[in-house]
Image (spheres, helix red, strand yellow):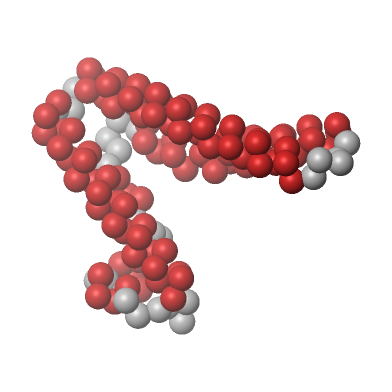
């Protein structure tokens, strides 16, 4: 319960940081097709870089886990890692919506359970 509270609190903080950055970007560049293109192209470049690095690290770790595994097992492990990365990336597709705002990423049902940051200090039961 304590870790869940910490995780939800951290998620809310990250959504808040993203919302502030998003609002600043919107104030600077507006909400026209050119700013949408800039936002989406920057996001694609950043995600491609970050996911590429993470995937490389995961592959290095996976190759060192069991040096005696067969070639088929190595291929299967790589497939599982790539498949997991793709599946975990699906929620990020919301960012491509023209009227996206990070505030929609709040944890589900958060407002109905615990409305304030102070409530996050008490673990969920």
Instruction: Looking at the picture, tell me which residue is in the foreground, 33 or 117.
Output: 117
Residue 13 placement (x, y as % from top left): 29, 57
Name the one closer to the observer, 122 or 98: 122
Q: Is residue 95 visible?
A: yes
Q: Is residue 114 above or below residue 10?
A: below
Q: From the viewer's perspective, is residue 29 above or below residue 59? A: above
Q: Nearer the viewer, residue 70 or 118?
A: 70
Location of residue 54 in the rendering, given as x and y in whole percent from the top left corner: 53, 37
Pinpoint residue 2: horizontal percent, then vertical percent: 44, 76
Q: Residue at x 65, y 35 (%)?
A: 59
- Residue 32 image-quadrant placement: top left
Question: Residue 64 at x, y = what percent?
Answer: 72, 41
Q: Nearer the viewer, residue 118 or 36?
A: 118
Quick check: can you spot residue 86?
A: no
On screen, 60 above or below 29?
below
Point 31% across, 59% down: residue: 12
> In the picture provided, is 124 more to the left or to the right than 30?
right
User: Which residue sits at x=81%, y=40%?
Assistant: 67
User: Quadrant of residue 78 in the image?
Assistant: top right
The answer to whether 78 appears left or right of 37 in the picture is right
Give left or right: position of 113 versus 19: right
Find the residue positioned furthest to the top: 34
Q: Residue at the location (47% across, 43% down)?
A: 91
């Amino acid at each position: 319960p304590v870790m869940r509270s910490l995780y939800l609190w951290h998620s809310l903080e990250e959504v808040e940081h993203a919302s502030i950055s998003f609002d600043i970007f919107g104030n600077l560049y507006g909400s026209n097709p050119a700013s949408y293109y800039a936002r989406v192209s920057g996001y694609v470049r950043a995600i491609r870089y970050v996911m590429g690095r993470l995937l490389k690290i995961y592959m290095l770790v996976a190759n060192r886990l069991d040096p005696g595994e067969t070639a088929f097992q190595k291929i299967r492990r790589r497939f599982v890692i790539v498949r997991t990365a793709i599946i975990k990336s699906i929620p990020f597709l919301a960012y491509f919506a023209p009227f996206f705002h990070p505030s929609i990423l709040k944890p589900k049902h958060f407002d109905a359970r615990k409305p304030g940051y102070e409530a996050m200090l008490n673990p969920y039961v």
